[in-house]
Image (spheres, rainbow, N blue to C red):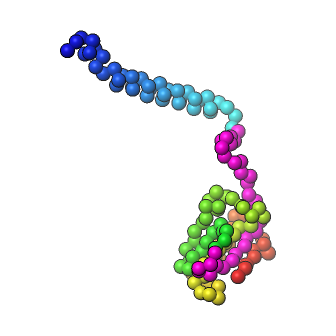
């Protein structure tokens, strides 16, 4: 085997290690530079800037199985299980009126609710009203 081949046998490992060390050092350097700048919220170029939603009301409506659900922030199913929608997780209000939409899925055609749903709804309304200072007269129900 030629002497030059033995001498450069592991050069790709050395190159890879050098790149990893350089990139790690560069990352920490840029992170340190970023910490020196004042704290200003930055909006990525491809994202939309969202404004903070001010919740000022709650709308509760029932939904009969097999019909279109429509938009909601929270849904309470037939067993009383509470599930937030992606709109609630992202704090979006497509209606623009600041009303939290709650949907109760009714197992019967008359739109009646179960005891478990009533209990879950009562707890949810209490928490939302307390967290967002929503008065009782701003809680609306629809059937």
6 on left or right of 83: left
Q: Is residue 52 magenta?
A: yes
Residue occupying the far right of the picture: 137
Residue that extends furthest to the top in the rendered view of this protein: 3
Q: Position of residue 12 (x, y in %)?
A: 35, 23
Q: Looking at the image, which is closer to me, 67 or 125? A: 67
Magenta stretch, main secondary structure class: loop
Q: Would you place residue 107 above or below residue 139 in this image?
A: below
On the image, the x and y values in percent for residue 68 come to 64, 75
The image quadrant that residue 46 belongs to is top right
* Picture layout, residue 136 above or below residue 19: below
User: Residue 27 location, x and y as percent?
Assistant: 53, 30
Image quadrant holding the C terminus, namely bottom right
Residue at x 69%, y 59% (from the top left corner): 92
Q: Quick check: 139 left or right of 15?
A: right
All told, the count of numbered labels is 0
**Region rendered in magenta:** 40-68
């Amino acid at each position: 085997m030629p002497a030059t081949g033995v001498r450069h046998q592991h050069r790709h490992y050395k190159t890879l290690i050098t790149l990893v060390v350089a990139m790690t050092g560069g990352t920490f350097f840029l992170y340190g530079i970023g910490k020196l700048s004042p704290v200003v919220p930055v909006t990525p170029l491809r994202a939309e800037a969202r404004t903070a939603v001010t919740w000022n009301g709650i709308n509760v409506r029932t939904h009969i199985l097999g019909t279109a659900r429509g938009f909601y922030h929270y849904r309470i199913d037939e067993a009383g299980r509470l599930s937030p929608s992606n709109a609630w997780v992202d704090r979006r209000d497509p209606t623009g009126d600041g009303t939290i939409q709650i949907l109760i899925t009714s197992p019967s055609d008359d739109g009646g609710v179960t005891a478990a749903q009533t209990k879950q709804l009562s707890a949810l309304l209490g928490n939302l009203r307390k967290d967002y200072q929503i008065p009782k007269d701003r809680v609306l129900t629809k059937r």
